Image (spheres, rainbow, N blue to C red):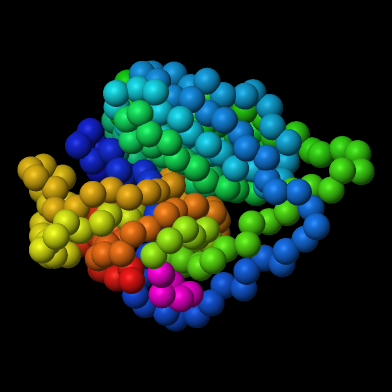
Amino acid sequence: MRFFSSPCAWLIVISAVGSACNRGNDTPPPATDAAAPPVVNITATEYAFEAPDTILAGWNTFHLVNRGDEPHAATILRLAPGRTLPQYIQAYGDAIRTRRPRPDWVRALGGPTAVPHGEGNATLNLEPGTYAWIDLPWHLLDHDQAHAFVVRPRTGNTPPPSAPVPTVSLRMFDFGFELSAPIKAGKHLIRIANRGVEPHHALLFKLGPGKTIEQHKAWLSRNMQGEAPSTFVSGTGGHATGAETFLAVDLTPGDYVLVCLVAGRDEVPHFTKGMIQQIRVE
């Protein structure tokens, strides 16, 4: 897969919520008496991360604070045993230059994103292993902006953090979205899952007054050049098949557009295959 490469398209590695289509429900994880997921703080600047080197396995909420003047992301990759972050950066760069497939020994799991001087969060369940946070593609390739970390097993008798309980679930598939219920205005915890064969993400934009999804699609087709008909709301990093993320959002009434901008080996962005949809938040 690949993403749009223009810096104007920084939103391509983030996901969000929405869909007016309902093809089925994900069963919410059962509530337990365990503690809420701990918060792992990540700070991004141009061009570095301040983040821990080790965290405990299980549910964690990753909170990204962007202190830079550019957008940043902290997409989580799991590395295959014996692989390292420098190896990934080298292999990814080689694949971009030669237009060959990306390394198949990493798995993208999502993660937080943030606009300049903004914040973002994503809650994920991580197993023990070797991982990395990576920034947007040009930050990774031009500045090596990434940070390796290790997830260690939990020990002792302390109950592990419980799974979040979503207010609504979003499925991504090839090529569309499924929402378990209509979204009302207010705070939500969205369970986002990729049930497709191809990697996907979901971006949520709010349309401006009088703007349409056709205008939004035309703007995307111009590689996000010119005046935007919408405002970016929230998102999380790209998801490999089967990956899940929980995203907290606070939505106001209005019309929104949900879209996937990932492009596969055919170099065709998924939104041009129909993975773009308008939703109404009442």
Q: Residue at x 77, y 61 (%)?
A: 32
| Residue 263 point in image, percent of width and height | 30, 52
Residue 5 position (above or below residue 251): above
Residue 29 position (above or below residue 20): above
| Residue 172 point in image, percent of width and height | 43, 65
Q: Residue at x 69, y 32 (%)?
A: 55
Say whether residue 185 is magenta.
no
Q: Toward the viewer: 209 or 218?
A: 209
Q: Residue furthest right?
A: 157
**Residue 206 visible, this orientation:** yes
Location of residue 102 by image quarter: top left
Q: Residue at x 36, y 44 (%)?
A: 13
| Residue 199 point in image, percent of width and height | 42, 55
Residue 193 position (above or below residue 67): below
Q: Give the magenta part as a residue range.
A: 178-184
Q: Residue at x 92, y 43 (%)?
A: 157
Main secondary-structure element of the magenta-colored stretch? loop
| Residue 17 point in image, percent of width and height | 40, 60
